[in-house]
Image (spheres, coloured by chain):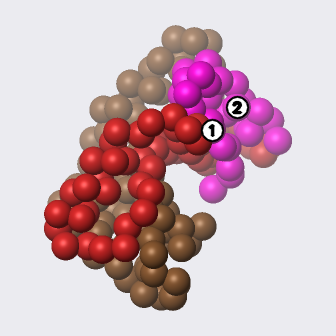
Chain colours: A red, B brown
Amino acid sequence: MKIRVDVMLKNGVLDPQGKAIGHALGNLGFSGIGDVRAGKVIELDLAETDSAKAIEAAKQMAEKLLANLVIEDFKVSVI
Amino acid sequence: MKIRVDVMLKNGVLDPQGKAIGHALGNLGFSGIGDVRAGKVIELDLAETDSAKAIEAAKQMAEKLLANLVIEDFKVSVI
């Protein structure tokens, strides 16, 4: 079962990567760009076939390794 | 309008970050983990209010800056 974990910086946490992307897009001539946020996505191929159990396992993985819960939020979904 | 751009390595391109995450999860005691792929997500807040035009603009941004089309695929969606 394929699981997707999205990890984004929490609202209010400064996102220098996003800011740099926003500036670079402006320099390339794109206009009308407001806030830009950059995050990570991790796609996991799990042997677990029960979707509830797979999601629960992925949540534990996110809490223990994939996300830094002090500054990041994560979201788990089945793909 | 908020647009989300997902950037993942193409299938067949070696993903050392994903491999490292897979190994680290194994070391933490998680089992049944197959392939792991790591990618980026960029959320853009665009002034454009027409969704078709916003998606088109985001595609151009992805082609010009956000994704390396030699090794990466991208997907644009409205959030």
The subunit carrying tag 1 is A
Which residue is labeled 1 in the image? A74
Element carrying mark 2: helix
Mark 1 or mark 2: name the one nearer the start of the chain: 2
Q: For residue B56, which numbered disc appears in the image?
A: none
The subunit carrying tag 2 is A
The local crowd at label 2, few if under 14, some if 14 to 19, many if 20 or more residues have their Cα within 10 Å, is some
Residues at marks 1 and 2 touching, judged by CB atoms closer than 8 Å: yes
> Which residue appears at 51% of the width and 88% of the height?
B50
Distance Cα–Cα, label 1 vs label 2: 8 Å
Which residue is labeled 2 in the image? A59
Residue B58 image offset from top left, x and y in percent: 37, 73
Q: Quadrant of residue B70?
A: bottom left
**Quadrant in which the N terminus of chain B is drawn:** bottom right
Q: Which residues are magenta?
A: A52-79
Residue A54 image offset from top left, x and y in percent: 73, 38
> Which residue appears at 47% of the width and 18% of the height?
B24
Of residues A39 and A76, which is closer to you in this image? A39
Residue B51 image offset from top left, x and y in percent: 52, 84
Q: Is A62 in the magenta?
A: yes
Q: Amino acid at mark 1?
A: Phe
